[in-house]
Structures are given as C-alpha cells and as structure tokens.
Image (tube, rainbow, N blue to C red):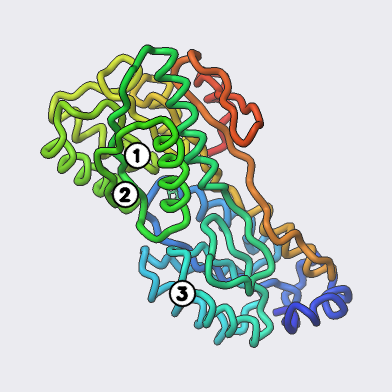
Amino acid sequence: MKKKILGLLACTALAASIAVGVSAEDDVITVGFAQVGHESDWRTASTKSAQDVFSADNGYDLQFVDCDNDSAVQLEAVRNFIEQDVDYIIIDPIVATGWDTVLTECEEAGIPVIVIDRTIDDSDKYVAWVGSDFLKEGIACGEWLKAYAEAKGIEEINALVIEGTNGSSAQIGRTDGFKQVADENGWTILDSQDGDFTQAGGQEVMESFIKSYEGQFNVVIAQNDNEAYGAQDAMKAAGISYGPEGDVVLVSFDGNKPAMEALQAGELTAVFECNPLAAPAVEEVIKQLEAGETPEKTQYITEGWYANEDVVTSITIDGNEEPVTQMTDEVLAGRAY
Ligand code: AHR
C-alpha cells in the first residue's frame, strides 16, 4: 500500500514524491468504494465502470461494498475503510444528509474522499465530486414536455411522478426541476410517490396511481429507467396505452441501453440521460492528488436528452439551447452502456 496522504493540506508535498501508474506490489493504490446498492441498471453500469477502472491490472486494490440502499450500512462501510487504512475512499451517498461526522473522521485519518453521482448537502469535507446535474435533468424534462405538448396540441398536463429514493439528491433534483417548470406552466401534478429507483417499486406505485387516478392522467414521469419498466407493466395490465402512439406520455431518466432501445421502439416517449461512467474521472482525480495537484472540486459529467420522435429538436435551459436527439439505429449503436 502506498504511504497515505496525510490530510488535504499535507497532500501536495507528500504526493509530489509519489509516481503514478506503477505496478510494483507496494505501489498498489487501495480504493474503498461505498456503492449505493444494486437497485437499477444504472447502478450496475456504475459498479462495472469502477471495477474496470480500479482493477488489479491498472494498479489498484478495490475494496467494494454494496450498501443495499441502507444508509447505516454505508456509514459503517466508510468507517471500515478508515480502519483498513485505505488510500482513497469513494462514496456514492444514498442520501444527501448525515455525512459531516464520518467525513470529519476520514479527514482526521488523512484519507481523501471522492464523492460520485449523488451529492452531499451537509458537509464539504471531500476533495472532489463527480456526477450529474439532477436539477437540470428535471428542468430538461419539463422544458421538453412543454415543447412536446405544444407541438402535439396537448392542452392540459395532468402528471404522475414516480420518484426515486426519497432523500437522495437524484430524487430531490429531478423532482424540484420538473416541478419548477410545471408550476411556471400551471400543470397539475396529481401525485408524486417514492418508487425507490426499482422496477418493483415503479410497478407498485403505478398500480396504486391507476387505482386512484385512472382516466385522469396523461403524463407519467418515472425518475429512472427501471421504474419506467415497472410503470409499463402496470399500465399494460390495466389496458392503458403509453408512448408516442399511446394515451400517456411516458418519460424516464438514466438512458441505459435497454431504455434507449425501448425509446426507439416507442415504449417510452423521452429519456433524460444520467451518465453512470464516473470512474475514469475519479481516476483522474486520484492521479492529480498523487501528483500533488489540486483537482477541481465540482465536476459535472456530460449527458443528453433523447426522444422517440423529432417533433422537438432542442430545448432552452438557463438561456442555453440544447439538442434533443431522436433515437435512431445510429445513435443506439454509439451508446457505451
Ligand atoms: O443516483 C443516480 C440514480 O440512482 C439513477 O438515476 C438510478 O437509476 C440509480 O439507482
């Protein structure tokens, strides 16, 4: 194991003497990764990305913990990494709060923490965060829906939202972003419930929505692909049609390949991408720290917006025009996950 970088202030001088990318056994870099769980296709892609990048062949010893969506398990995993004296800790925080104490412990132990994907709201004791702009994803969804409704002559929006794990920054950002556009346009959000980012959760929430609101809704916002698959199953069973040819506009977030295939097939109306491939950027952060450099603290991953049809080709977010890409064979072939 490499000599631990002793606190962020001390890291510059110490790390400058350490070479990067070497493979001798005592130069192996130990990385502890407290992953959220295995609730979705997105999560599987995120885990694989970390395992590919932080492999033994690349000079790493990856200590991976699947926290199964349990915040107590995640805090314990981080404390175990401190006990093991790992070189770096990666955290994908299940929820946004409750972090300051354990991050203080990491800081006192001199272990740099890199946060990925979801954000931490109650502490800044980490060296860098790499992830998605969830608020922007929610706004993009709303702006696309506004333009789509105008193009299709849909006069009223009565939406149901299947939220992700409550308290996660992904759920908070997507919910707030969509609501912001809904409020600006006087849309009705009939209901918004936690589907826990799982297919079973999405199905269960959609079944209960159908019981309460059948015949009253024309838009379903699923906050990830897997929840959208669950919603499809529930609507199919109830004889409700969805997608560009159906009665209900169905959108999801993430955009893993199976969802993009479903989008092209007309099983989804639009998809707002969330990129799970943070690990290469995390490795860059580690290389910078090893070289005694200061990484950028906030690093957004690029992501795009996709639709089945080409009726909306761009949307404007914060004054910037951004493309909406129609899903075609060619676009699908270029998808990395
Ligand atoms: O934090 C990212 C979210 O978590 C993804 O949208 C979802 O699929 C995952 O479980």
Between circles 1 and 2, the one closer to the viewer is: 1
Amino acid at dot 3: Gly
Badge number at residue 198: 2
SS of the residue under disc 1? strand
Residue 76 percent location from the top left of the image: 44, 79
Q: How far apart are marks 2 and 3 (CA)?
A: 23 Å
Instruction: Name the mark on residue 245.
Output: none
* Foreground: disc 2 or disc 3: 3
Under 8 Å from ligand 1: the CB of mark 3? no
Q: In which quarter of the image is the N terminus?
A: bottom right
Task: Mark 1 or mark 3: name the one nearer the start of the chain.
Answer: 3
**Amino acid type assigned to the residue bearing label 2 in the image:** Thr
Number of other residues with Cα within 10 Å of mark 3, as a class: few under 14, some 14 to 19, many 20 or more:
some
Residue at x 30%, y 34% (from the top left corner):
188
Q: Where is residue 239 in the image (x, y as percent from the top left)?
A: 14, 24
For marks 1 and 3, give the CA distance: 27 Å
Residue position marked by numbered label 3 in the rendering:
98
Q: Is mark 2 on a helix, strand or loop?
A: loop
Asked whether residue 21 appears in the rendered view, the answer is no
Residue receiving disc 1: 222
Q: In this view, does 63 lie to the left or right of 58?
A: left
Residue 250 image point, x, y percent: 33, 29
* Residue at left offset 60%, top offset 24%: 323
Whether label 1 lies within 8 Å of ligand 1 gets the answer no
Tell me, yes or no, if residue 207 can be seen here.
Answer: yes
Total residue callouts: 3
| Residue type for callout 1 | Ala
Q: Which residue is drawn at 54% across and 60% down?
A: 119
